[in-house]
Image (cartoon, helix red, strand yellow):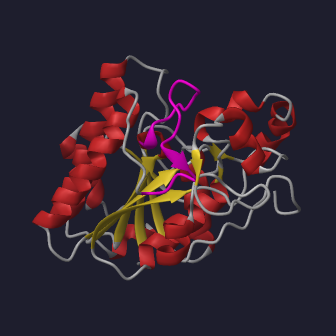
Amino acid sequence: MKNIVVTGGSGKAGRAVCRHLVERGYTVLNVDMAPSSDPVCPMLRVDLTDFGQVMDAMQWTGGKDHPFRQFRTPDAVVHLAAIPVPDTNPEELTFRTNIVSTYNVFDAALRAGVRRIVWASSETTLGLPLSAANPPAYAPIDEDHPMRPESAYSLSKDLSEEMARQMARWNPGTTFIGLRLSNVMEPQDYARFAGWQDTPRFREWNLWGYIDARDAAQAVRRSLHVDMEGADHFIIANSNTVMTRDSAGLMAEIFPGVELRGTVKGRETLLSIAKARRVLGYAPEHDWSGPNG
């Protein structure tokens, strides 16, 4: 698993993933429409809604002296490219772009002989944005929580998880790992967190969750190597919330009627990462309020 195609490598999570992998000796190709602000690896401009372009990217060998010249099939594909959030484009455009691009990447990768695909699903599949009118079924939310897509964006991610399950069924021996990434943050974003402390409802929509882009990259790397076949999905968040207050107290104030399952200690995340810890070996390293923020 050393030769990796990363779609969306110019995006917020993508930049961290490319850097994380390159620094650990992987050969990485960034497939995107725009250059990265952190160009640590070669980039190929590809419109992922065009199947022919995607197929070509999966078998791209670069120029004479290019590091990709030595292989025609990548060892794995990390699919992060998408319209990344709801409400920034017409709903139909978001849905069509995300569904078609994901189908194209999955299918082209399989046709090229790729056996492992790690891809970005979303926390939004679990009912976000949450509110008093739309509370979670329970907390901490885990992978057994009902799927409740509330936008074309989250519906595209929900249906992409089903797409992964069926394509894995069609192709025994393949692995599709969907990472339900929380709200991705880079270190420079942490300056904003202080302004949220007096208004907990401002971040109630995802139970005050976040994922440091560097920890998202760690989750991707671990997913590339975990011993499993078929399709599965994992919530990927940091181990704490964006707040300085205790998580149980926040739930009691903002979602008083929601069942709190188990013991929630201190600022512990309300987006459960227990499954990712157990199966992937995922262990967040960055705390926005600590020395590794």
**Which image quadrant: the N terminus?**
bottom left
Question: Horizontally, is 147 left or right of 255 in the view?
Answer: left
Residue 2, given in percent of the width and then of the height, sits at 44, 77
The chief SS type of the magenta part is: loop
Q: Which residues are magenta?
A: 126-143
Q: Where is 220 relative to 90, above or below?
A: below
Residue 242, given in percent of the width and then of the height, sits at 75, 45
Residue under the image location 25 percent in, 62 percent down: 59
Residue nearest the viewer, comparing 179 with 277: 277
Residue under the image location 76 percent in, 40 percent down: 189
Residue nearest the viewer, comparing 83 with 156: 156
Classify residue 153 by image quadrant: top left
Residue 3, given in percent of the width and then of the height, sits at 41, 72
Q: Is residue 141 magenta?
A: yes
Question: Horizontally, is 156 left or right of 134 in the view?
Answer: left
Residue under the image location 31 percent in, 74 percent down: 71
Residue 63, visible in the rendered structure? no
